[in-house]
Structure formats: C-alpha cells, structure tokens
Image: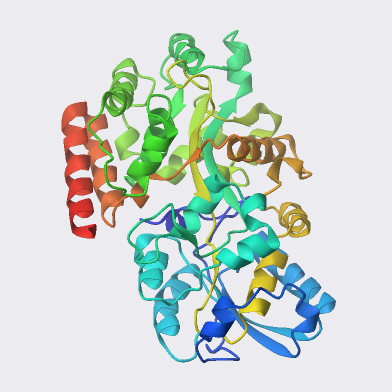
Amino acid sequence: MSRNVFRTGTVIAAVSCLGLAACAPGSSGGSSASKSNASAPAQTDPAKLGKVTLTVWDQEVRGGQAKQITQLNAAFQKKYPNITIKRVPRSFDDLGKTIKLALSGDNPPDVAEVNNGRGDMGAFVKAGQLLDLGKYAKAYGWDERYPQSVRQYSSYSPDGKTFGTGNLYGLPQVGEVVDLYVNTEHLQQAGLAMPTTWEQLVAAMKTLKAKRPGEAPMVLGDLDKWPAIHVFGPTQAQFVAPDDIRKLAFGQKGANWKTPGNQQAAQTLVDWMKAGYLDAKTIGTGYDNANKAFSQGKGTFLMAGTWLAADPMPALGSKVRFILPPPSKAAGGKEVSTGGTGIPWAISSKTKHPDAAAAYINFITSPEAMKVLASTGNVPVANTSEQTAATPLDKDVLTAFGKVVEANGLVPYLDYATPTMADTLGAALQDLLAGRKTPAQFLDTLQQDYSGFVAKNG
C-alpha cells in the first residue's frame, strides 16, 4: 500500500487521491532522447534552449498542492517565456493508471510525477522509461541540496531491482514524517513535562494511565490495518540502527527481521497493550475516528504524520504540539523516525527536451520554490526548518522534518520492502496487538514475506 494513497488532505499535503479531469496525453517531442543528448553536458540556462513546449503530468490537484504548482508554473513561464508548460493535472489514482501506458508509448509526457514504489518507478527504471538524472544532479547541485536520506526515495539500480541506492530518477517537492502529537494540557494537569527521552515517554504514559482512568494515553485506530505501521516504525527506530531499517524497508539483500532489536520493538507494542497505554478497542477503531477523538481531547499522545496537522489538529488550538519521537538510550540519543517524500518528479527517457525538463524540475524544487510551498501549506522537502509558519503547530512540523532530515534520521516506511509487505505487516501487527501472535511469530511472518521477495528479486 502506497502511503500516497492513504495519506491525504494535509497542510502539509504530500500527496492526494482526489482529482480533476485530465487533459489529453502527449509530449511536444515524442521521440526518444538521443544518445548524444544523454552524454552531452547539461545546458542549465533555459533561456538558451529556444522555443520549447513541455508536457507535464501531475497530481497537484488539491488545496495547497494546486496553489503551489499553479504559482510556480506561472513564475517559470514568466522567467522563461521561450518555454511553454502544457500542464495535465490528474488525480493520484488516474495518474497511476495512465502513466504506465503513457511512458511505454510513443508520445509520453516530458515530465511526470511518478510514484516511487517498486511497482511504478522501479518498473519504469527497469524498462528504461525514465531518465537517469545524475548529470543534472551534479549540474544543479541537487546532490548537495537534497541529502541522501531524501534522495534514497527516488534512487534505484539501473535494472530496477535495488531500491534506495543507485541512480537518481526523480526529485520530490514535499516531505512527511511520523512524529508525536502531544496534548500539552493533559501533561500539565498530570504534573508532567514534555518527554525528551523514550524512557520519559513510557513513564509519562504510566502516570497518565493512573491519573486519567478509563483513557488510553496513546491514541491509535487500526481498523484500516496500516495505521499501526506508523506506531511500530518509530518504535522500531528506538532499538534498530537506522541503516538496518533502511535495508529492511528497501528490500535489500542481507537484512533480517528476526533480530533482537525488532523483537524488542514488537514486545514494546505488546507491553503497551497489556498496560493499557493503547486502547483495547484499537483494532476495531477507524483511523479517522481515532484522530477525531484525539482532536476532541481524548488521549495525550498520537503517533502519526505531518499530514494530520491541518485536519483535525487545529481543533485543539495551542494545546497540541508536534515533536520528534524522543530518542531512547538504545538509540544513542539520536532522533530517528519513519518518513518519506511526496511523489517525485521524473523525466521520460523519450523526451526531446531533457535540458528543459530538468530546468523545470530544478525551478519547482529550488530554495525559492520551497518558500512558495511553505506559504501554500505544504512541507518543503528541502530548507524546511528555514521556512516561515503560520501557527506554532505548523512551525513544529517544519522544524521536526527539517531536523530529522539534516541529522540523517529519516528512515523509510516499512511497507516499501516488498510488493506485498503492506498487507503482510498490517495483518501481522493486528495479530500482534490482539495477542494472536507472539513477537517471534510476528517476525517469522515478516521474514517469510521478505525472504521470498529477495530470493525472487535476484
């Protein structure tokens, strides 16, 4: 399950599933980029490229997403009147259904947002349908502007088998991270300070359970199966080294789910259920209902992502804050959390205008563009902590994402690992929380899915 499907509607809108009607497909060029174009030095002055029409497919169709791309497109064409942007806005679902056929045809878009999962970007890389952006990364300094912890989400080996390393095939505009929403009023009423370590977080939940009887300190609704992944991920990061998580999440050889650290992370969730830190009705509660309950004052902690900051969190006003999961002693005091990026912008290998396409991507991901993204309610994936926020909560979000990226503490969503891991992990976590599986059995299930995929992937 792509997080781009289930994480929608955000101040911090990384991606969306709602759509507008799309224009007819088609690139101004249509033929394959020649080998001479591929090997030629990058032309980084768009004004010298002559008259060009770029066909661009995107899914920036909702709220702040639509505002930012409309504003940036207008600014680009004003600065470079020789380049015309033929925009084709599509819903996330529509884009996913049509881009595969378009890239394999004779008339693909020059630039398109391409889901970075194995089934999309990985498959397109394997088929030779996307341009390796390496020379443009060097020419524009993308490899300096975007740390490896961000670039990894758009990196594949040329054969599409290895995810997380290799060549760069896209650049995202926005970012997202799973952190901790905190009801500070509840903390104050219980005589507690904001936790700064994992151990303090657990101790706070023990106190809150005693002082607020009948209410679980940590809110989670896992009826949809995937939300518990966003609690397990940051918990896992307290006991497993970031590089080991990256290997697991990207489905790389040599990684193993059956380790003491993963066992400890799974046992932590079991312990939380037994202690009542998570509600006994967690499995039967919907994601949206749980989040709404938190926004109405139920519970003190909610482990969820930046995409919830706009709705429903404003209902709590100044009572709610957003912090990175406080680090454990086992993690060495380093703040690490699960996160990722919005859908990357990629270039068709068949475009006749690779330099213009790269210039466009550079423009919409530039430091100036990051300011536009922040001003329209999005989370810029670069220069994040430098942006101006409208509210303290928005500032928390921007600061948290910027901090974890700069510290190389952003680790991938675990359902990236294999094509079936989202379903496998989601179901296994429900079994774990319900007591139907022990931590060891839980890890056996994940390892079976993982090792089967790695063996087939070669």
Q: Quadrant of the C terminus?
A: bottom left
Total tally of numbered discs in the picture? 0
Q: Position of residue 162 (x, y in %)?
A: 35, 56
Rendering quarter of residue 177: top right
In-image side of 166 versus 367 (left or right): left
Query: Viewer-proximal residue, 3 or 208?
Result: 3
Q: Is residue 452 above or below residue 58?
A: above
Residue at image position (38%, 30%) is 236
Front-most of residues 323 and 218: 323
Instruction: Classify the position of the N terminus by image quarter.
Output: bottom left
Vertically, is 170 above or below 196? Answer: below
Give the x, y percent position of residue 389: 76, 43
Q: Position of residue 175 (x, y in %)?
A: 58, 50
Q: Inspect this view and state whether residue 438 appears.
A: no
**Front-most of 347 and 85?**
347
User: Based on the displayed image, in which of its 4 quarters is residue 394 positioned?
Assistant: top right
- How was this image coloured? rainbow
Residue 84 vs 421, above or below: the answer is: below
Q: Is residue 203 left or right of residue 81?
A: left
Q: Nearer the viewer, residue 323 or 36?
A: 36
Query: Where is residue 183 shown, x and y percent of the image?
Result: 59, 25
Kindly give the residue lying farthest to the right in the view shown.
79
Q: Is residue 165 visible?
A: yes
Q: Residue at x 33, y 22 (%)?
A: 268
